Amino acid sequence: MRLLLIGAPGSGKGTQAELLAARFGIAHISSGDLLRQHVREQTSLGRTAKSYVDRGDLVPDGLVMTMLREPVLAAAGGYVLDGFPRTVKQARASYAVVQPLGAEVQAAIHLDVPREELMRRLLARGRGSEDVEAVIENRLKMYQEKTVPLLDYYAGREWMFTVDGARSAEAIHQDIAGRIQKLAVIARPEG
Ligand code: AP5
Ligand code: MG
């Protein structure tokens, strides 16, 4: 099973990805967590990415693709990708990478959460230098500019759906899992 989680900063991508990974026995691959790990370990990728992450700008597409290639290809049993793709360009490029392996995406889940709730959650969490008001504002702006067009690009695909992300984490999880199971029935009528 291959899942994509798309949503604004603070929409619960990480929270839902953990729950889905545990439920379906698949790998959780978070572009943001991997970037933060590279920054902490001061790898060459991390040194380049640091200023983008600190400002809340998107890291250049090529860098993110390079970073994700190995973990995605290694996740033979399936994965939930949290925070990738985030631009139309990333979506096109990722399709080119996984499609020859016969590994099509099975569901893209959009977590829809109002802006005030996003702000409330992120200020309450306070993750390092990222969750301060100015950086949150910029992350939300990047989401509007770069990721909302990705939702339009995916709109109308039967494997893409939006869920109300302003409920309890457990209610959202049950909703997503139910919809994925319905999709799986449609995709594999013989099973
Ligand atoms: P990334 O790590 O992806 O950060 P983000 O999109 O800003 O999102 P967050 O991780 O802050 O929130 P989340 O949606 O995971 O929510 P969470 O579950 O934590 O990216 C960081 C940076 O890396 C980017 O700014 C960019 O620079 C770079 N980057 C990453 N991917 C990239 C890419 N593909 N291309 C280019 N650059 C990239 O929840 C948030 C809080 O809310 C938590 O405290 C949680 O406990 C709480 N919460 C969660 N669900 C609920 C709920 N249902 N009710 C109440 N509270 C909840
Ligand atoms: Mg996250």
Image: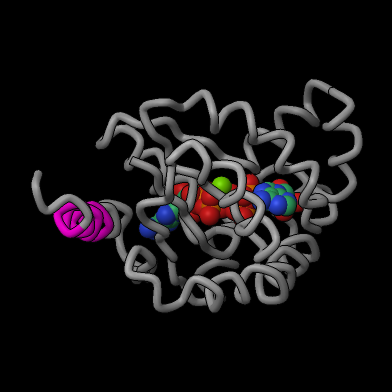
Q: Which residues are magenta?
A: 174-186
Colour pattern of the rendering: one colour
Residue at 17 percent of width and 59 percent of height: 186
Direction left: furthest residue: 190
The answer to whether residue 125 shows anywhere in this view is no
In reply to whether residue 176 is colored magenta, the answer given is: yes
Residue 170: image location, x then y, percent: 26, 52
Quadrant in which the N terminus appears: top left
Above or below residue 149? Residue 94 is: above
Direction front: furthest residue: 100
Q: Of residues 140 and 132, which is closer to you in this image?
A: 140
Residue at 39 percent of width and 38 percent of height: 18
In screen coordinates, is 48 left or right of 10? right
In screen coordinates, is 171 left or right of 6? left
Q: Overall secondary structure of the magenta stretch?
A: helix
Above or below residue 119? Residue 68 is: above
Q: Total of numbered circles in the picture? A: 0
Residue 157: image location, x then y, percent: 39, 71
Residue 105: image location, x then y, percent: 42, 50
Residue at 36 percent of width and 31 percent of height: 26
In screen coordinates, is 80 left or right of 183? right
Q: Image quadrant of residue 118?
A: bottom right
Residue at 90 percent of width and 46 percent of height: 51
The answer to whether residue 117 shows anywhere in this view is yes
Quadrant in which the C terminus appears: top left
In reply to whether residue 21 is colored magenta, the answer given is: no
Residue 6: image location, x then y, percent: 51, 60
Q: Image quadrant of residue 161?
A: bottom left
